[in-house]
Image (cartoon, rainbow, N blue to C red):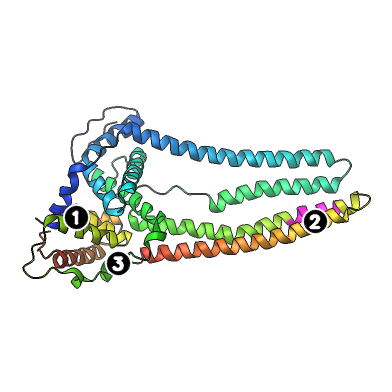
């Protein structure tokens, strides 16, 4: 049984299901290596634990691919499984975090607005985005990361399990936050 | 550069994780779980074997003592069964969204909370007949009646019940805090 993904022609062509699983995993780990690494970085600030989280994500992915069967697009599947693993990781470490994490609505837009005429360099912008992401509760963080990864509203809603209206509201808030905090316009 | 483009430039140092490594880690995790389950079953078998052997030896001369041993054996089996039924880990749905994952985690905590609240009562209900039979055996089947041992058993029963109730209450309170923390995390959904 071969599986063709939307991102490329993956000709598995092997009857054995575990071979399918392995071939799909190889494809996924090559195709999504960068987004998965960014996801781990977004959910875990501690560099020594980022690698652990990345491993957990890859193990969850490999296990889940046995049940993939083309039920949705591979991209959606990968993001769902990866975000699930990341959220579980955050929940496991919730004692350390739960007092500090906030909703999107609780983030003060004006708190770090750069002064007029200030040029925020890219490294600092990225640091600010990361800090903002890591401040959020898991669900808002997921929407934020998926938005930054360039997924559409429909895809984000499908992956997060939120309604499209709820997702749209969150995205609107995210764009406003980014524009205010980084002092730049938004294209998406 | 937009925030999205900026975010995606982080790709450069993305590490690769090989299939062999993932397989190795996954299989070692499964092995650890299998070992833990096997140890629990072996412990259960050993305890049941000891109680069974004690019951068999006492069957002809001291039937009440034999019945008490059988009750304790049943208690061990029942406890393991209830723990697996009420508090055993359910596999998390791998492809669930974060919202569903949060709900799943909450359900798991609720199950454990039920186990904390009900498990102690179940344990007490199943243990009491065994202790009653053991005390009856000491009174009716031994001559002279070993009052000192019976006293120790009663003290043990009272202390164990008190400790069990305290531990159960403490565990339930801790789990309730976990559920509240989870609710606060999931609130934005």
Which is more foreground, mark 2 or mark 3?
A: 2
Q: Residue furthest right?
A: B143
Q: Secondary structure at mark 2?
A: helix
Report whether residue B169 is seen: yes
- Name the residue beneath numbered marker 2: B152
Real-space Cα separation, disc 3 to disc 1, in angstroms:
17 Å
Q: Which mark is residue A148?
A: 1
Residue A33, quarter of the rendered image: top left
- Name the residue beneath numbered marker 3: A103
Q: Which mark is residue B147?
A: none
Seen from the viewer's position, the closer of residues A158 and B37 is B37
Real-space Cα separation, disc 1 to disc 2, in angstroms:
67 Å
Residue in the image at 37% along x and 61% along y: A97
**Which secondary structure class fits the magenta region best?**
helix
The reply to the same-chain question for discs 2 and 3 is no
* Bounds of the magenta segment: B128-137
**Crowding near the residue tagged with mark 3, few <14, some 14–19, many ≥20 C-alpha atoms within 10 Å:** some
Residue in the image at 28% along x and 59% along y: A134
Count of residue discs: 3
Q: Is residue A21 above or below residue B156?
A: above
Q: Secondary structure at mark 1?
A: helix
**Crowding near the residue tagged with mark 1, few <14, some 14–19, many ≥20 C-alpha atoms within 10 Å:** some
Asked whether, in this view, residue B189 is left or right of residue B164, the answer is left
């Amino acid at each position: 049984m071969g599986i063709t993904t939307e991102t490329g022609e993956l000709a598995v062509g092997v009857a054995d299901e575990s071979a399918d699983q392995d071939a799909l995993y190889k494809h996924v780990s090559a195709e999504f290596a960068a987004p998965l690494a960014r996801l781990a970085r977004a959910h875990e600030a501690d560099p020594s634990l980022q690698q652990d989280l990345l491993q957990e994500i890859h193990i969850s992915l490999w296990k889940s691919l046995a049940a993939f069967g083309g039920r949705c697009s591979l991209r959606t599947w990968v993001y769902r499984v990866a975000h699930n693993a990341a959220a579980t990781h955050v929940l496991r470490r919730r004692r350390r975090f739960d007092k500090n994490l906030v909703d999107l609505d609780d983030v003060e837009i004006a708190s770090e607005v750069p002064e007029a005429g200030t040029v925020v360099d890219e490294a600092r912008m990225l640091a600010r985005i990361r800090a903002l992401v890591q401040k959020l509760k898991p669900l808002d963080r997921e929407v934020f990361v998926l938005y930054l990864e360039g997924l559409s509203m429909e895809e984000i809603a499908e992956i997060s399990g939120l309604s499209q209206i709820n997702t749209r509201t969150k995205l609107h808030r995210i764009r406003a936050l980014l524009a205010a905090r980084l002092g730049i316009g938004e294209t998406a | 550069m937009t925030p999205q483009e900026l975010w995606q430039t982080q790709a450069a140092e993305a590490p690769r994780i090989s299939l062999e490594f993932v397989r190795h880690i996954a299989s070692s995790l499964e092995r650890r779980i299998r070992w833990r389950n096997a140890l629990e079953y072996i412990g259960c078998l050993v305890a049941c074997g000891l109680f069974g052997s004690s019951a068999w030896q006492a069957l002809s001369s001291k039937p009440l003592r034999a019945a008490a041993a059988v009750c304790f054996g049943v208690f061990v089996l029942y406890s393991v069964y209830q723990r697996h039924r009420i508090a055993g880990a359910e596999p998390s749905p791998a492809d669930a969204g974060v919202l569903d994952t949060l709900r799943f985690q909450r359900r798991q905590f609720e199950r454990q909370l039920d186990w904390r609240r009900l498990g102690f009562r179940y344990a007490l209900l199943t243990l009491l007949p065994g202790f009653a039979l053991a005390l009856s055996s000491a009174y009716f089947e031994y001559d002279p009646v070993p009052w000192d041992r019976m006293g120790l058993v009663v003290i043990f029963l009272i202390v164990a019940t008190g400790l069990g109730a305290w531990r159960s209450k403490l565990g339930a309170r801790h789990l309730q805090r976990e559920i509240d923390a989870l609710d606060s995390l999931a609130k934005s959904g």
